[in-house]
Image: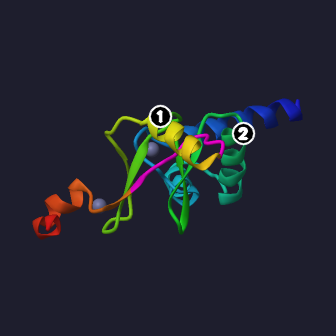
Amino acid sequence: MVTENLSRRNTRQRKLVLEAIHWGDHPSARDIFDAIAKTERISLGTVYRNLIILEEAGEIVQVKSDPLLVRYDRRLGPHHHLHCKVCGRVYDMPLPYDAVFDREAAEKSGCRIEGHSITFKGICRACIEKSPENRF
Ligand SMILES: [Zn+2]
Ligand SMILES: [Zn+2]
């Protein structure tokens, strides 16, 4: 049946999009499209459509560490990032999430706080190893 084929194709494309987002990596829609398009026929529009579906299904979240580019993350729990100013990549930071910070913010502001995220700015380890003068 036509609809059956269509839904199977949709499921497959959704899986391709999801699998293109590796843990610890934070690709943009364009990065995801470029990765899949190396071996599969897919359009950028299909990638965007599936990203919306996956986000609504709670399988991925948007990362807004980079004001110019929406990126996607498979790591759903609250965590912090580093945005490297040299290579532009966004990395997970190995720091615990501090829920006390949320409670304090709620108490001091009277606002309902649902969470926070910290984006560190700087230069990643790979870029420092490539050019050690970047450390300073
Ligand atoms: Zn870097
Ligand atoms: Zn992340």
Q: Position of residue 105 (x, y in %)?
A: 53, 45
User: Dividing the image into 4 quarters, which one contains the N terminus?
Assistant: top right
Q: Nearer the viewer, residue 133 or 42?
A: 133
The answer to whether residue 3 is seen in the rendering is yes
At horizontal 66% and vertical 35% (from top left) the residue drawn is 12
Q: Position of residue 33 (x, y in %)?
A: 57, 55
Magenta segment range? 111-119
**Badge 2 local density, few (<14 within 10 Å), some, or many (20+)?**
few
- When the figure is inspected, residue 37 is found, relative to residue 20, above or below; the finding is below
Label 2 or label 1, whichever comes before in sequence order: 2
The kind of secondary structure element at disc 1 is helix
Q: Nearer the viewer, residue 123 or 46?
A: 123
Q: In the displayed image of the protein, which residue is found farthest to the left?
A: 132
Which amino acid lies under the numbered mark 1 shown in the image of this protein? Answer: Ala
Cα distance, mark 2 to mark 1? 25 Å
Q: Position of residue 101 (x, y in %)?
A: 46, 41
Q: Nearer the viewer, mark 2 or mark 1?
A: 1
1 with respect to 55 (left or right): right
Q: Position of residue 22 (x, y in %)?
A: 45, 40
At horizontal 64% and vertical 46% (from top left) the residue drawn is 110
**Mark 1 = which residue?**
99
Which amino acid lies under the numbered mark 2 shown in the image of this protein? Answer: Glu
User: Dividing the image into 4 quarters, which one contains the C terminus?
Assistant: bottom left
The answer to whether residue 74 is seen in the rendering is no
**Mark 2 = which residue?**
56
Which picture quadrant has residue 13?
top right
